[in-house]
Amino acid sequence: MGGAAALAKLKAAGKLDARERIEQLLDPGSFREIGLLARSQHGALKARTPADGLVAGWGTIDGREVYVASEDASVIAGTRGRVAEAKNQRVRDLALRHRRPFIALMEAGAGRFQENNGAIAAGLGARFKEHFMLSGRVPQVAAVMGACFGGPSFTALQSDLVTIVASSGYMGMSGPPVVKVGIGKVVSAEDIGGAKKSATITGQADLLAQNDMEALAAIRAFLSFLPSNCDELPPNVAPRPAACDTPEGALRLTQIVSENHRRAYDMEELIRLIVDGGEIFHYRQTYGPSLITALARMDGQSVGILANNPMKMAGAIDEKGIQKARKFVDTCNAFHIPLVFLVDCPGFMVGPEIENQRMVSLASRFLNSVIGADVPKATIVLRKAVGLAYLAMGGRVMAPDAIVAWPTAQFDVMGPAAGVELTYGKEIAKAADPAARRSELLASAEAQASAYIAAEMALIDDVIAPVETRAVILDVLARTRPGRVPSFKHRIDP
C-alpha cells in the first residue's frame, strides 16, 4: 500500500484502509484479489503506486459471491491511474459475465494528470458505459468514504444504493481547486457536497453512515434483500413473527391511527408493527421524509414499502419524495421485490415554489414507474387517498393485487375542504351562518368519501380491520409467487 505514514494518516482520521474495508465487508477469508502486482507504467510514478492504488477481486457476503473494488487513498491520495482503471474494468466485466453484484468502495481523486493529459483524454470514460450495462442486471452499490469529486461521483450515482460516510465522504461535479480555477470562487468540500448535504438536500446519497463500519454493514444488509442478478428472485430467509401478531401489538395497531384526519401519528411505528421482527432498511430516510421508502421482510420475503408520513407535511408528497420514490420503485421492480403501499396522503404539494421544481414532470415520471412495475403490489389505504397522489401510491388504476382500506379511509379527487370551497364558495358566502353551512357541506363531502362507499362500488376489494393488514399482504405474496418469472426488465436511472 502507500506506506506507514499514509496509512497512519487514514487511521488518525478514523478511516479503515482499502484492504481493511474489504475484510469488514466480505465473509472472513473469502476475498480473492486480482492485479496485486499492478503498478502505474508512468516512469515517475511506478515506484509509488503499489497495486496502482486499487484493491480488486471477489469474495462472498452471506455465502453469495460479489465483486468488489476498493480505492486506496494511501497511494497518491487515491488519484485514479490507467492501470487501476484496467483492473476496475476487469472486475466490472466479470461481475456482468458471472451475474454477480458489483461493489465500489470509493475514496478517489480525479484521474492522474500525468497519465491522462492531452489527446489521450479523447478515449476516457468507458466505465460509465460499463455501469450502464450492469444496471438492472446485477445490483450495484457504492460507498463514498472519502473525497470523490468528478468522475467518481458519476460512478457512484449509477449505483442502486449510494452510502456516504459522515465527516469524510464528499461528492460533486468538481472539488474546491477546480471550482476556484473554473469560476474563481473559494469553497469548501463540505459546501460542494458534504455527507449531510448529499443525504438531506440533494438526495444523491441514499444512506448516511456515521463511519466506515456502519457503511459496510449497510451494504451487507441492503444486498441481503436483493437477488444476485435479475434472473433470480430475492432470497427468502427464515420468517420472524411481527409485533402485530401479539395481543399487545394488535391493540397498538388499532389505536395508532386516529379518525381525526388532522392528527398525526408515527408511520414508522406502524410499519414496524407489521413486518418481520420490526426491522426495516431505510432508503433516503432524511430526504423527502414525508414519504417513507424502506425495505423489509414479511414471512421471510423481501418487500419494498412506500408509506406516507403524517408527521412530515401531513404526508403530502413533495419533489424530493417523488424523486426517491421513483428510483426506489424502479430498483424494486428490476430485482423483483414486491411493493407495499401504505396510503395516508392529502396529495402532491402545490404552489409556485413546488412548480419551480418541475413537479408535473417529476410526478408524471413517478406515475410511469408505478404503472410499469409488474411486481406484486398490495395497497392499504389508512386514511386520506386524494387525487393523483393516491394513484401514484398504488391506486386501483395501478392494478394492485390487493387494494383494501381501513374504516378510517376516505377517497377524493381533492381534499374535501378544497372541494367544498371550489364548488360551494358563493353559496357559503351568502348563507346566514357561513361557518355552519361550510361545516354542513364538509360533513356531507366527507361522508361521500367513505371507504365503505368505495367498497359498495367495488372500487376497492374490502374494508378491513387494522389487525388484518399483515394477513392481506402475506396473502398477496403467497398468491403471486407461483407466477413470478424473473428476467431482465429495465435499467435503473440515477
Image (cartoon, rainbow, N blue to C red):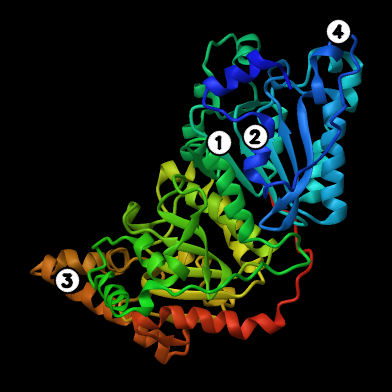
Under tag 1, what secondary structure? helix
Q: Nearer the viewer, mark 3 or mark 1?
A: 1
Which residue bears the numbered disc 2?
Answer: 20
* Labels 4 and 3: the sequence-earlier one: 4
- Of marks 1 and 4, which one's residue comes earlier in the chain? 4
Amino acid carrying mark 4 in the image: Ala
Q: Tell me residue 269's x, y (percent).
A: 35, 63
Q: Find disc 3 in the rendering and name its residue.
A: 439
Mark 4 falls on what kind of element?
loop
Q: Quadrant of the C terminus?
A: top right
* Disc 4/disc 2 C-alpha distance (Å): 28 Å
- Residue nearest the viewer, comparing 273 with 365: 273
Label located before the other in sequence (4 or 2): 2
- Name the residue tied to disc 4: 44
SS for tag 2? Answer: helix
> What residue do we see at 56% from left, 30% from top?
169
User: Which label belongs to residue 212?
Assistant: 1
The image quarter containing residue 242 is bottom left
**Which mark is in front, 3 or 2?**
2
